[in-house]
Amino acid sequence: MLKSRRNFIAKALSLGAYSLTIASGLLHSSLAHAQRLKFSLNNYHETIGYLFQGAELIDNHYKIQIYRLPKVAENGANVPIKVVSNFKDITKIYILVQNNPHPLSAEFTLSPAVAAQVSARLKMAKTSNVIVIVEADGKFYRKVKNVKVAKGGCGG
Amino acid sequence: MANSSSIKIRTKRLDGNTQIRTLITHPMENGRNRDKIGNFIPAHHIQELWIEHNRKKVISCDMGGSISKNPYFDFLLKGGEVGDTVTVSWVDNLGNTDTKDQKIK
């Protein structure tokens, strides 16, 4: 009797620990999934809605400058872009390509130790608007530029 | 990669700030391209890149598959002294990772 009760307790404990590890594993993977979800949304408006939850986007602010981005890109596989901004408390810079299968390209998280100046190279499937959204002081500022793509860079 | 790192870093002092340029060797496959016989090439792209200045994270970048192959980035670090350490690290969707240190010259 005593022995079987001990057995039962040991089993219950080990089972409990097992289910705990499973649960924490699930939790972790769902968190990682939420973090990556924004990159797998395949519609521009859906992506904007998911990222900014209906917050107002202030258009064409003079404190955002876009450099290096060509008006006509010969090859969509490698389109340079440089974003410079004069806002003081910048926390994030988003770069989106409206007509790409997955519009969100990159999301930069800035600390006060760096200047608000980033550059990258994008892939563009076809002619599209390139949208830069800067988050500063809890507000969102958007700048849009159109790029004509002669040869798409996403298909094989 | 034992001898050659996938990361190249160049630093340059500019008016008291430090420009950090980095070039990473990576295929950045987004999972929608097909190979010669028409099968999809599995997605293989960097998910996160981050830069540390003296072991303190200063900027990070989450990205999807629509960043170009062999991605190039540049950033401007406020301040930064000669001899400081700049570290660039990345992790991709297959769990591969690489990191490299560079002293500011």
Image (tube, coloured by chain):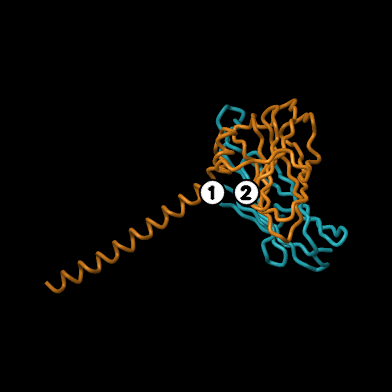
Q: Residue at x 78, y 55 (%)?
A: B76
At label 1, which amino acid type do we have?
A: Gln
Estimate the x, y position of residue B46 in percent, counting from the top left: 62, 47
Tell me if residue A8 comes above or below residue B73 in the rendering: below
- Residue lying furthest bottom: A2
Q: Nearer the viewer, residue B46 or A34?
A: A34
Q: Residue at x 70, y 56 (%)?
A: A89
- Would you identify the image quadrant in which residue A49 lies? top right
- Residue lying furthest left: A1
Mark 1 residue element: helix
Instruction: Kindly tell me whether residue B100 is visible in this rendering.
Output: no
Q: Nearer the viewer, residue A40 or B26?
A: A40
Q: Check the residue under mark 2 and report the chain it is in.
A: B
Instruction: Kindly tell me whether residue A44 is visible in this rendering.
Output: yes
Structural distance between the alpha carbons of marks 1 and 2: 9 Å
Using a 10 Å C-alpha cutoff, classify the residue at mark 2 as few (fewer than 14 neighbours), some (14 to 19) or many (20 or more).
many
Marks 1 & 2, CB-CB < 8 Å contact? yes
Q: Nearer the viewer, residue A4 or B76?
A: B76
Estimate the x, y position of residue B17 in percent, counting from the top left: 83, 60
Picture disc at residue B66:
none
The residue that mark 2 highlights is B62
At label 2, which amino acid type do we have?
A: Asp
Picture disc at residue A35:
1
Horizontal side, residue B16 vs residue A98: left or right: right
Tell me if residue A139 comes above or below residue A7 in the rendering: above
Who's orange, chain-wise?
A: A
Q: Residue at x 83, y 67 (%)?
A: B82
- Quadrant position of the C terminus of chain B in the picture: bottom right
